[in-house]
Image: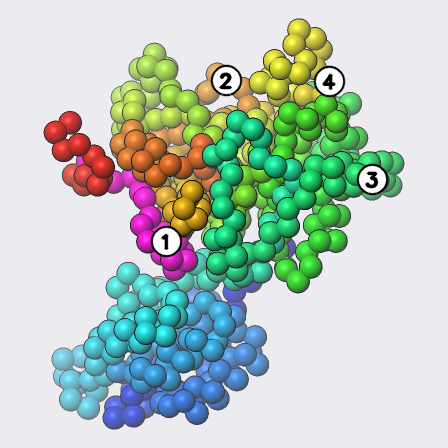
Amino acid sequence: MNNTPKVKLGIVAVSRDCFPMELSEDRRKAVVEAFDGEIFECLTTVENEKDMRKALAEVKEAGVNALVVYLGNFGPETSETLLAKEFDGPVMFAAASEESGDNLIGGRGDAYCGMLNASYNLALRNIKAYIPEYPVGTAPEVADMIKEFVPVANAILGLKNLKIISFGPRPQDFLACNAPIKQLYNLGVEIEENSELDLFAAFNEHANDPRIPEVIASMEKELGEGNKMPGILPKLAQYEITLLDWMEAHKGSREYVVFANKCWPSFQTQFGFVPCYVNSRLTAMGIPVSCEVDIYGALSEYIGTCISQDVVTLLDINNTVPADMYESEIKGKFDYTLKDTFMAFHCGNTASCKLTCGTMKNQMIMARALEPNQEPNITRGTLEGDIIPGDITFFRLQSNADAELTAYVAQGEVLPVATRSFGAIGVFAIPEMGRFYRHVLIEGRYPHHGAVAFGHFGKAIYNLFRYLGVKEVGFNQPKTMLYKSENPFC
């Protein structure tokens, strides 16, 4: 993927001037040795503000874009937090635990205490920093904390350099996708909003583009036996080239781009196809394209792309699993109740690599309104199939009606159960989904779209949301933990 950042880590040790500097330096070296990966070791240990400037210059010259500030001993509160302020990138703070009961006089560093003062000074200066769940440890433990910092840093860097390009207003009956954009600017994300006419004009300008045959060949190879509507591929290829060209021409000062595009109902009548398959292909390239101009859906997908370094998707939290289907195919085979399960669906925007078998079809729901009782034409272009079974993380970052950031994250799985339905769809299971649905999704006024990462990334996504300033992150609480809105007498 070339639409996400590459993290280059650096580590700077800090030292309180009334503690031995060697203690911090030796502990820093031990962390670097324990870290299984590339990390720039800054040789300047920070005791004061002049040291801070020197260390800052060293890490910048080395191309470091994500920094670990390591308290090898108590640490200097002012200079270590100024380092985080002036670094201009994601910063993690961690501290050293004491090593031996036989060395608690000359070798005691008191970093456990220093970490408290560091966090207080970060707050005084309004500096955001990543602090691990338990930020004090031995060299191998701190090395593991740094590994957990990497996906969070990757997403932070991506958001700082992201532009969301949208086409068209939100559809009339999908007001849930219409959210205040003020929080995008607060996150450092740029947005370019365009008319469908702009997209239509650009599409028409790409008629007979010489690259179309090459893209068609790529689509044919990807679809294989699922290429059931080959006649629609030239238009889809033309549309794919249109979006990719628009992306390159409109990046501006940003490095990364995602799309939030209108896809119905006038899209079909004017463009002559549905864009779902192209959306799936761009998402597989690391360029998420959300449906129904869901700007925060596109943002969430991009976060999942950065953190998982894998293809993601955006799905409706769509329908219940029928009781007879649960009884025959889930109960006794998987440790879930009926209310733990649901079906997540979208028209055909999920990449072929995340489907058990992808087939090109027409969009059935749109055909009911636009092409009833006739051979489908303008509603062709979806990629249908069951979503691959395995671990997933369902999540969303959203701005509510009051322009406040809200978020949720839940881990679960896609079950290896045939859906017997249409679209890109899967049978999902999330522990305590019924309660989560009522007391987080409904109570929190979330829209029907949720981003899906393929794997369990809840810890990193939760940490990112907290870093971004989301005060309360919803999650699927266990039975023993009541939601604030939950009736205790039920």
Looking at the image, how many numbered discs can be counted on the residues? Answer: 4
Q: CA distance from mark 1 to mark 2?
A: 36 Å
The numbered dot on residue 377 is 4
The numbered dot on residue 240 is none
Taking the image as drawn, is residue 34 in sight? no
Q: Residue at x 75, y 48 (%)?
A: 245
Query: Decide: marks 1, 3 in contact (CB < 8 A)?
Result: no
Q: Residue at x 57, y 35 (%)?
A: 170
State the scheme by which the image is colored. Answer: rainbow
The numbered dot on residue 206 is 3
Residue 477 part of the magenta segment: yes
314 up-or-down from 15: above or below: above
Q: What percent of the width, then of the height, locates residue 24?
A: 32, 84
Nearer the observer: mark 3 or 2; the answer is 3
Q: CA distance from mark 1 to mark 3?
A: 42 Å
Q: Nearer the viewer, residue 272 or 405?
A: 405
Q: CA distance from mark 3 to mark 4?
A: 21 Å
The amino acid on which the numbered mark 1 sits, given as a three-letter code, is Val
Mark positioned earlier in the residue sequence (3 or 2): 3
Q: Which residue was labeled with disc 1?
A: 470
Q: Over which residues does the magenta segment extend?
A: 461-479
Mark positioned earlier in the residue sequence (1 or 3): 3
The amino acid on which the numbered mark 2 sits, given as a three-letter code, is Ser
Left or right of 310, for residue 27: left
Query: Decide: marks 1, 2 in contact (CB < 8 A)?
Result: no
305 up-or-down from 485: above or below: below
Q: What percent of the width, then of the height, locates residue 65?
A: 52, 70
Mark positioned earlier in the residue sequence (1 or 4): 4
Which residue is outermost to the left? 489
Q: Nearer the viewer, residue 165 or 99?
A: 165
The numbered dot on residue 421 is 2
